[in-house]
DNA sequence: ATTGAAGTACACG
DNA sequence: CTAACGCGTGTACTTCAAT
């Protein structure tokens, strides 16, 4: 879906259309501590984007319409859209509230017309979502999930982009390395510092590293630099991805965390919030009828220094009292061994069953 | 040599 | 001129101890 949260807000309140809309934390006149969840394209003209600190977004455009995240609403809309999407293939995968894959590979017997069929299905799907939900979407079509995802990204907003197997190389090579899923800021920085494309050709004049340049690195080199991720990068730069489209999802952990309005050492504030977090995690655990074995407490101090402490029990447990006592022991350890002000506390349970 | 626990780093929406 | 930095979840890696 295109700029999903902000687009829903526009739909619910048409007065917002044409104005910059930012969904996320409260900017509090520039002192807010949160980030932007999603913003519309008008807001993007000011340089605002997802995950940007809300204080910076406020600096860039204090006149924008800043809205809180109404997750329950987005969840409901998402469910309706996913019901539509699922009708288009038995093989589907929901990735997030606003993203899904469909595997519409034709049976081998009717191969050949696959991409034409895919394109007409995609047009129909976009149309149905728009008619039923009044929201625009973008679809990428490709020989695998990797290519479909990048194509969808490039098609935004309200677009459709189909990349057939013989077009994959030409499609990928001119893209920035950050366009490749799995290459985040850290990996991109390490790659930039390799200066792979300063060997005297025209690439010297390009400001950004392209996937074409990345392809000069051997699989061994990438493996040495980034381990397993490096090998995946090697495959992906060549458009290779065999991961299946699958709807089975296994929850591996449940957690909650909270950032305080101000960094604090006040035990009232810390423990009141921690109790709340424990209750919420426990509620989630009950809702899923899980048991757990590992409890992890997260503590972020002033200056963003983040640590975890965890305890794995001898046996599976599903009891609130055990979470309470073990989690508090772990949190107390933090308080004892570090005198710094605390920015965030969190709790996660894992080894679920 | 293998396994598992604890802790960290990074990615993504 | 620079820094600003949520939340929930998953994967992978390192280190160290126990089996």
Image (cartoon, coloured by chain):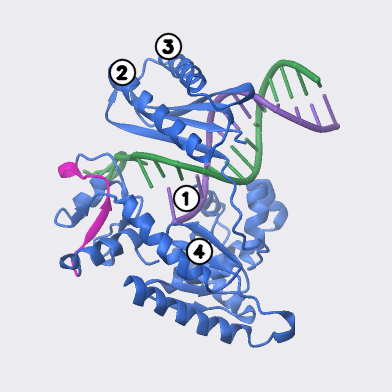
Chain colours: A blue, B purple, C green
| Callout 4–callout 2 Cβ contact below 8 Å | no
Q: Quadrant of the C terminus of chain A?
A: top right
Q: Please give the name of the residue rendered at 31% of the width and 18% of the height, measured from the top-left corner.
A: A265
Q: Is residue A161 above or below residue A13?
A: below
Q: Please give the name of the residue rendered at 25% of the width and 56% of the height, measured from the top-left corner.
A: A22
Q: Nearer the viewer, residue A29 or A71?
A: A71
Give me the chain letter of mark 3: A
Span shown in magenta: A18-30
Q: State the separation of the CA atoms marked 1 and 2.
A: 32 Å
Q: State the separation of the CA atoms marked 3 and 4.
A: 45 Å
Q: Position of residue A58 (x, y in %)?
A: 20, 50
Q: Secondary structure at mark 1?
A: helix
Q: Earlier in the sequence, mark 2 or mark 3?
A: 2
Badge 3: residue crowd in 10 Å (few <14, some 14–19, many ≥20): few
Q: Please give the name of the residue rendered at 46% of the width and 77% of the height, measured from the top-left corner.
A: A125
Circle 1 is placed at which residue position?
A185
Badge 4: residue crowd in 10 Å (few <14, some 14–19, many ≥20): some
Q: Position of residue A297 (x, y in %)?
A: 47, 26
Magenta span has A29?
A: yes
Asked if both marks, 1 and 3, belong to the same chain, the answer given is: yes
Circle 2 is placed at which residue position?
A265
Q: Residue furthest top?
A: A336
Asked if both marks, 3 and 4, belong to the same chain, the answer given is: yes
Rendered image: mark on residue A275: none
Q: Secondary structure at mark 4?
A: strand
Circle 4 is placed at which residue position?
A100
* Label tally: 4
Q: Nearer the viewer, residue A80 or A188?
A: A80
Rendered image: mark on residue A336: 3
């Amino acid at each position: 879906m295109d700029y999903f949260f902000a687009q829903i807000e526009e739909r619910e309140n048409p007065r917002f259309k044409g104005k910059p809309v930012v969904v996320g934390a409260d900017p509090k006149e520039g002192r807010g501590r949160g980030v932007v969840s999603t913003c519309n394209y008008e807001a993007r003209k000011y340089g605002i984007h997802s995950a940007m600190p809300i204080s910076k977004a406020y600096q860039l455009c204090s006149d924008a319409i800043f809205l809180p995240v109404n997750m329950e609403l987005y969840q409901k809309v998402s469910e309706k859209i996913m019901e539509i999407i699922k009708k288009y293939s038995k093989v589907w995968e929901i990735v997030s509230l606003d993203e899904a894959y469909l595997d519409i590979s034709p049976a081998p017997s009717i191969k050949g017309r696959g991409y034409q069929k895919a394109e007409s299905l995609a047009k129909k799907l976009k149309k149905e979502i728009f008619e039923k939900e009044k929201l625009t979407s973008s679809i990428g079509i490709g020989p695998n999930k990797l290519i479909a995802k990048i194509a969808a990204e490039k098609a935004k907003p309200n677009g459709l982009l189909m990349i057939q197997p013989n077009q994959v190389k030409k499609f990928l090579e001119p893209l920035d390395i950050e366009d490749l899923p799995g290459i985040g800021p850290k990996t991109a920085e390490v790659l930039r510092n390799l200066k792979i494309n300063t060997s005297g050709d025209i690439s010297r004049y390009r400001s950004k590293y392209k996937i074409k340049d990345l392809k000069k690195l051997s699989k061994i080199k990438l493996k040495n630099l980034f381990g397993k991720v490096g090998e995946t990068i090697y495959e992906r730069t060549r458009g290779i991805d065999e991961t299946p489209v699958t709807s089975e999802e296994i929850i591996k952990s449940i957690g909650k965390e909270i950032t305080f309005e101000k960094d604090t050492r006040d035990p009232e504030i810390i423990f009141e919030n921690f109790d709340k977090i424990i209750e919420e995690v426990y509620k989630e655990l009950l809702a899923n009828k899980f048991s757990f074995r590992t409890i992890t407490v997260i503590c972020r101090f002033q200056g963003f220094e983040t640590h975890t402490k965890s305890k794995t029990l001898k046996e599976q447990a599903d009891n609130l009292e055990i979470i309470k006592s073990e989690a508090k022991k772990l949190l107390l350890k933090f308080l004892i061994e570090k005198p710094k002000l605390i920015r965030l506390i969190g709790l996660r349970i894992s080894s679920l069953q």
